[in-house]
Image (cartoon, rainbow, N blue to C red):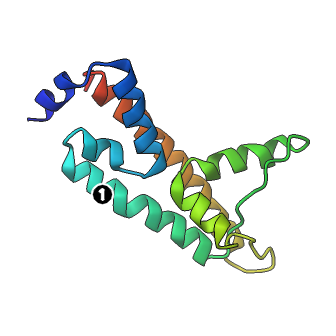
């Protein structure tokens, strides 16, 4: 059944919409393509990982072009999609550098975003029929 779902989705516009959904809500692309098990796992684990990063007092990095590594961390944070914007709207992610868990929190936040970017790439491959 998974191969049939991928065969139905060939239009580039639909493929990019699926990828946008996969970025905005982790796991949504796989759910759209009928890969329920993967989609639900991503839908639960990636936002949970992001929430753990906030709970561990990690920082959502600002976009600062003058500091390339900070800008890359900010790009990675945004990779998780809607949870990032919800956290920003709720004034979360200020980080507390003196907290013993600060670096762990940063790692969770960054890795959640980067993993979601990999999930988006996987969604693209599935939508193209490559997987």
- Give the quadrant of residue 11: top left
Q: Residue at x 52, y 56 (%)?
A: 82
Q: Is residue 76 left or right of residue 9?
A: right
- Residue under the point 28% across and 50% down: 39
Residue at the far left: name it: 1
Q: Look at mark 1 in the image and give the residue it sits on.
A: 41
Secondary structure at numbered mark 1? helix
Rendered view: 119 above or below 88: above
Farthest residue to the right: give it.
66
Q: Which residue is farthest front?
A: 13
Residue 66 against residue 62 in the figure, above or below = above
- Residue 72 place in picture, x, y as percent: 72, 43
Quadrant (top left/top right/bottom left/bottom right) for the N terminus: top left
Count every numbered label the image shows and give the total.
Answer: 1
On the question of residue 108 being in view, the answer is no
Task: Locate residue 44, reporting x and y percent.
Answer: 35, 63
Left or right position of 64 against 75: right
Quadrant where the image shows the C terminus: top left
In the displayed structure image, the side of residue 99 where residue 32 appears, left or right: left
């Amino acid at each position: 059944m998974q191969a049939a779902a991928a065969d139905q989705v060939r239009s580039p516009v639909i493929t990019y919409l699926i990828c946008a959904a996969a970025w905005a809500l982790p796991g949504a692309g796989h759910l759209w393509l009928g890969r329920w098990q993967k989609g639900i796992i991503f839908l639960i684990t990636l936002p949970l990982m992001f929430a753990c990063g906030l709970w561990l007092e990690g920082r959502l990095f600002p976009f600062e072009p003058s500091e390339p590594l900070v800008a890359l961390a900010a790009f990675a944070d945004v990779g998780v999609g809607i949870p990032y914007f919800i956290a920003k709207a709720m004034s979360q992610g200020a980080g507390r550098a003196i907290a013993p868990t600060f670096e762990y929190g940063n790692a969770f936040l960054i890795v959640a975003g980067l993993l979601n970017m990999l999930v988006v790439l996987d969604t693209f491959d599935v939508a193209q029929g490559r997987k």
